[in-house]
Image (tube, coloured by chain):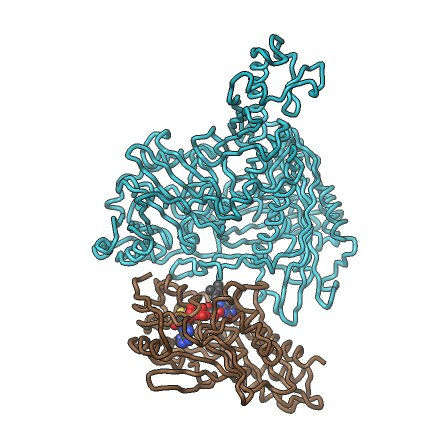
Amino acid sequence: MTVSPAGSSVPRIEGPLKVSGIATYTSDFNFPGLLYAVPVCATIGSGTIAGLDTSVAGSMPGVQAVYHRANIGRIYRSAPDEGLGTHLDERRPPFEDDVIRYYGQYVAAAVADTYEQAIAAANAVKVTYDAKEPDVRDQLEPEGQPNLDGERGDPDAAFDSAPVKIDQTYSTPVETHNPIELHASVAVWDGQDFTLYETTQGVVNHRDVAAEMLGVPKERVRVISRFLGSGFGGKLFPWPHSFIAAAAARDLNRPVKLVVSRDMMFQNVGHRPRTQQRIRLGAGSDGKLVALMHDSLNHTSILDDYQENCSEATPYSYSTPNFRATSGLARRNVGTPTSMRGPGAVPGLYALESAMDELAIALGIDPVELRLRNEPNKDEGLDLPFSSRHLVECLAVGAKRFGWSGRDPRVGSMRKNGLILGWGVAGCSWIAERFAAQVAVDLRDDGSARVATATQDIGTGTYTVLANVVSEKTGIPANKIEVVLGDTNLPPGPISGGSMVTASVIPAVSQAIESAQQRILMAAIETEGTPFYGLEADALAFSGGIVHRKNEGPERGMAFEKILAKAKARSTSGLGKAEATFGSEDRKFSQHSFGAQFAEVTWQPEIARLRVSRVVTVIDAGRIINPKPARNQIEGSVVMGVGMALLEATEYDARFGAPINNNLADYMVATNADAPQIEVTFLDYPDRVLNDMGARGVGEIGLAGIAAAITAAVYHATGVRVRNLPVRLEELLA
Amino acid sequence: MEMFAFSEAAGVEDAIRAGAESGTAQQGARVRFVAGGTTLLDLMKLDVERPLAVVDINGLPLDTVTKLTDGRLKIGALVRNSDLAYHPDVRSNYAVLSQALLSGASAQLRNMATTGGNLLQRTRCMYFRNRALPCNKREPGSGCSAIEGENRSLAILGTSAHCIATNPSDMNVALTALGAVIQIEGTAGKREVPIEAFFFEPGDTPERENVLDPGDLVTSVTLPPPPQNCSQVYLKLRDRASYEFALASAAIVASVDNGTFSYIRVALGGVASKPWRSLEAEEQLYDQPVDEASFRRAADAALAGARPQSRNGFKIELAKRCIVHALGVATAS
Ligand SMILES: Cc1cc2nc3c(=O)[nH]c(=O)nc-3n(C[C@H](O)[C@H](O)[C@H](O)COP(=O)(O)OP(=O)(O)OC[C@H]3O[C@@H](n4cnc5c(N)ncnc54)[C@H](O)[C@@H]3O)c2cc1C
Ligand code: SF4
């Protein structure tokens, strides 16, 4: 294998481990003496525990303990964090009080020698309740005064006097992440230290939270997450089951495994909250926006304030002199919501881009053209230039690839093979920021390299991308680069969230490599027998793994591994550190990725069959480091977007408060058969404001325009505008 | 899940003897046969089924498809759904059955699922599957949570004030259109029951779904000789393209002579408490011209007795479109 520079499509380096079943996911870890914990979940949506009888359960075969409020021991609260420092969304420690605030809340946990014994014991715990009627209503009204998120000009007056107006409310349902890998914790306690194997998108954050909640210093907790069967944000922050497992392991002095079941995943590990968003657009007859107002609400749990931040992308999407965004929360008896792929922007842009489509129709202007007419030349929300924005080109390239010029805007007018076609378009965007990151790179005497950081690969290809980056920067082939992730013993790395890992680690990798290489140059000049003995280090250069004189080509140089061998060194290690841009007050640019998504649906009214047949996506996400996993992220987002637009919704029973479709048959995600023909194009404009390679992330942006593009296409095909996702066929039957 | 005893039946009689120990062969059975296990194990994990004994019948010699001398086709109770769907005789002579099977579940499930198990699969009503919530089918007398709850996927035909659950099987709809007969062996010997008499409507005993008594083993299903000059169609409508139970489906077996229907069977799925033969629709079609107006009359007649619930009223229109379209496909020249 040769050098695999960034930009080449390298297959996943961990692929063989995964397809052969060797990759150890969290619940694959087993240890001598391992016990199994199974939680008992509340069967009411609101009320208090009146009685909890563990006498039968506790004496069942194999049962080691049944934990509940009275005997779990102290689990502390983790104090509120600034930003995303030491963060968890559901802050109440498990079993903290006897109040039930959502259906399925953990009230006890049985621990036994086998999984089956633990389940049987959990079932035998008798819990009685004083139940109250839960509140899981869909219709949201704000608690108190909504928050003013941004304002410019006089939006009310401008809207009132606008010649053309759109005033509509859009809502998105509760969506459950449903990664295929179940959440799990395997907790090991050795009398002094915890080792926690966790399904987490952030080992460092998990360690920091766990240390505080378990009441031990950070150094006493090690968190490991080698492979993740995806998370979609649901595994960004710790959930209560992790502390149940850890507390049980400490109390019993035995390793404890707790796997969260699929039905619990609808209750106890977060969801995208329901949103309800009023969008008001006022425009002149030329299509130029004069006013834009975005008032959003989302539900949250009784104890935690989770903000979906629906208007994240609204202030900078379009040019308008008059603008306002507000947000509010409505409390419901539901588990605590959390980030789900593209939090804020995904539901927010569904609403904004749908309203733009409605405005285009009201004005009789092509929806692509309407967006071009409202293209801003700076971020009007921050009053800063964009680091790099190519939305116009995304729309143009997408329109060409899709064949948009062949569109007949009349409803139901287009047909193919006897099917009615509908076409729709939407823009998408996502933040382009960095978290702080530290990375260690070792260059070794066998010509190999090791790169290590405590970030993790959540299935998106981080292992491979790091190998790409190190390969490009050192000239070492990717197959000689060992990538080590997912362990808090490594230098602290970022959470896998916000599509920021790639951008965050690049500067730290560069620095680490430079420092490791510098030490090789030092070795070269200090070691007898190298051609550089006695020279000054700054007379030397490092090219493609070869040390040579600056005034000569690498063909007269020496491979770095030979220098290490001559210096009798196994390796040189360099550490790189990079600061965060995320949350920084002091910025000179507005940093975002952009894209355009075009969708085609087919509609057969005679059998009420609606399918998404074709999606073209064009993405401007800086330089693409490895096109293969990058394309894979967009394709996956498009398929997920089909689910968001047409299928996914967690339904709560109004009387019991239970998420009632709590399995993969009744909660519908898109299947392979629902996947449309997908075309992805990357524009590849490096954004060097973010890092020296100009790379951003692509994990979320592909989901940000798709639902609006599909619902616009549904309108074009059927004449029915669905403003309450998902589109159900009954709404199209009339 | 509860502890249970597991055994393998040595023969049909052995299975019957073991099954006869159960107080009932319906909801609450203390002994359950397991075939493919794709319904039973699911419900055991949910504690909806809590047998004390599980008897594995997979070793019994009931896994062949045989053409009988009188022209009937005998399908062993343990024939897998995928084998049945791809059986040459079924594909060419009973196409509606093949289509129905292949529209169901997923390839993996069809590889496990058996004819007997599919026949006896349970409703997908979400309250039936949640042990914490009231459900008359699971806990007689506890109430029906679905009537005032989430009932989008549930039935509009053959329901009662006690239960509105749907029989979710696709296979059963095709078997009904084909006039299948169920062979049963039990403590009292062998008997045969036409599929239309095999299932009960819920009435005030929704926990009782069919004619089976303790020990009764379904041994085979027979299909009458292939209907001559008939076209057969199974049309299944649902939200997503695969891996979803029917919101409405129709199985049609039709023969046309001189522009009018000379033979017609119409069965509906996804909308009724049991696989639903629509005599009303058939009556509207016999000797009638093959045209859209006849199809519509048939569809209206089929749904005339429908009782919609809070969230499934759309199924009336959906089922009508399903019937009309399926008739159109079946009679397209
Ligand atoms: C996710 C999912 C999606 C599905 N989608 C569909 C779909 O779209 N359409 C569809 O039609 N079906 C669907 N199914 C249901 C599937 O077809 C049934 O689960 C399957 O056919 C059951 O067959 P089995 O052999 O596995 O039955 P088992 O689970 O082994 O048995 C089911 C019941 O029948 C009894 N039984 C089995 N054999 C006999 C016998 N010979 N005599 C007496 N009693 C017997 C058992 O005791 C048990 O009570 C789906 C199932 C799942 C899990
Ligand atoms: S419809 Fe039938 S199965 Fe569903 S809750 Fe009511 S009684 Fe139970």
**Which residue is at 44% across, 50% downward?**
A182
Identify whether B326 is placed above or below A45: below
**Which residue is at 51% across, 48% downward?**
A20
**Which residue is at 43% across, 32% downward?**
A488
Q: Nearer the viewer, residue B260 or A370?
A: B260
Q: Position of residue A22 (x, y in %)?
A: 48, 45
Chain A: its colour in the image is cyan
Specify the farthest residue to the right. Answer: A405
Q: Which chain is brown?
A: B
Identify whether A523 is placed above or below A678: above
User: Would residue A715 appear left or right of A261 to someone viewing this image?
Assistant: right
Q: Position of residue A377 (x, y in %)?
A: 71, 35
Identify whether A127 is placed above or below B238: above
Q: Is residue A145 visible?
A: no
Ligand 2's image quarter is bottom left
Q: Position of residue B134 (x, y in %)?
A: 35, 67
User: Would residue A1 appear left or right of A35 to someone viewing this image?
Assistant: right
Q: Position of residue A128 (x, y in %)?
A: 26, 58
